[in-house]
Amino acid sequence: MERIRLGNTVFEGRNNAYLIPGERPTLVDVGVATDSVRRDLRDGLDATGHEISDLDAIVLTHWHADHTGLAGELQAESGADVYVHEGDAGIVAGDPEALDAERQIRERRFEEWGIPDGPLDEVTSFLDGHVELQGDAVDVTTVEDGDRIAAGDGELEVVHLPGHAAGLSAFAFDGDDGREAFVGDVILPKYTPNVGGADLRVDRPLETYLDSLARLADADFTRAWPGHRDPIDDPAGRARVIAEHHRERTERVLSVLDEHGPADAWTVSAHLFGDLSAIHILHGPGEAFAHLDHLVAEGVVERDGDEYLAADTEVDVDELVPVPETKR
């Protein structure tokens, strides 16, 4: 397996694509649809002795443009089958109904969160101004949890781990030292993946993500190959660190409501993150919303219209945000 490092000046940067050589050459994730990333990908394939026309399969971890943007044009050039979880397939395929449904959810959430006019105009312009980064429409083959995809000289097992995105899936395989996985943005080595703003279609986003972290930790992979930056040699440990981060954030959200509530998601976000710009105007209140939504479901926060206030009840944050145990 070969890691191909891709630039990304639009979002968080330092994307990875992974080439699995062999009888069925397979590419895992493809990068955003910009000229610089096209060059990075072609140069990376060339360094391994491959061309785009050699590809027989493309596997996508989730629908975000920095992972899928070049899939359509790569498919057109190579004839490769493109696999993505059914939860994200409509958006990757460019299905108008799926795209319209996502936009409607976005508009509703922005209103609920209370984003002021200035930041609202900025984030809307950012999102609408980068539509081309999604690239060409893709003829997708949908997969589900537990499916197996022939790749290289072996196979990949689909492990559905939603939260950051509805269809986000890891792809597990037998490595030299045990079971490994391409994990997309389920866990990252430096940042914590955004939850709540990254995919507005996810119901109960924080709970869903915590369940995925627990499942990933339980899988006890020996190594994870993320969508950004360097490989993770202790995936279960990293999942635990991220869960602990969300436990601390839950405590901060409760403190904000105690000191400043009732408050909407935008106000809570401002106390958590301060001033935001560009895509972070989506991610900040989205993350605040994910925590507020979780606390409402757990009965420790009440919602009145678009505002949230702490309920008069005892709170055990350790129970609200479970941290998975690690086996090693």
Image (cartoon, helix red, strand yellow):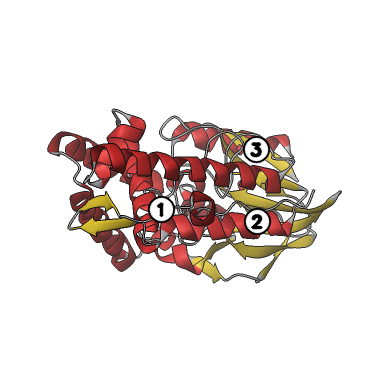
The disc at residue 261 is: none
What secondary structure is marked by label 2? helix
* Amino acid type assigned to the residue bearing label 3 in the image: Ile
Amino acid carrying mark 2 in the image: Leu
Disc 1 designates what residue? 136
248 with respect to 267 (left or right): right
Cα distance in 3D space between marks 3 and 2: 24 Å
**Relative depth, front residue between 186 and 293:** 293
Vertical relation: 67 (above or below) 190? below
x and y, in percent, of residue 30 in the image: 55, 46
Q: Earlier in the sequence, mark 1 or mark 3?
A: 3
Query: How far apart are the two marked residues, 2 and 1, measured between alpha carbons?
Result: 32 Å
Instruction: Mark 1 and mark 3 in contact? Answer it, CB < 8 Å.
Output: no
* Nearer-the-camera pick, 39 or 15: 15
Q: Position of residue 82 (x, y in %)?
A: 56, 61
Evaluate whether residue 281 shows in this view.
Answer: no
* Residue 306 seen anywhere in this rendered image of the structure: yes
Instruction: From this view, report whether residue 242 is shown above or below residue 92.
Output: above
Name the mark on residue 4: 3
State the residue in front, 113 or 172. 113
Q: Are marks 2 and 1 in contact (CB under 8 Å)?
A: no
Q: Secondary structure at mark 1?
A: loop
Q: Comparing marks 3 and 2, which lies closer to the viewer?
A: 2
Q: Quadrant of residue 242?
A: top right
Outermost residue toward the left in this view: 117
Horizontal side of 71 relative to 157 (left or right) equals: left
Q: Residues within 10 Å of mark 2 (few under 14, many from 20)?
A: many
Q: Which mark is residue 216?
A: 2
Work out how far the residue at label 1 is from the one at label 3, CA to CA, in angstroms.
Answer: 21 Å
**Residue 238 in the image, given as x and y percentages of width and height:** 65, 42
Q: Residues within 10 Å of mark 1 (few under 14, many from 20)?
A: many
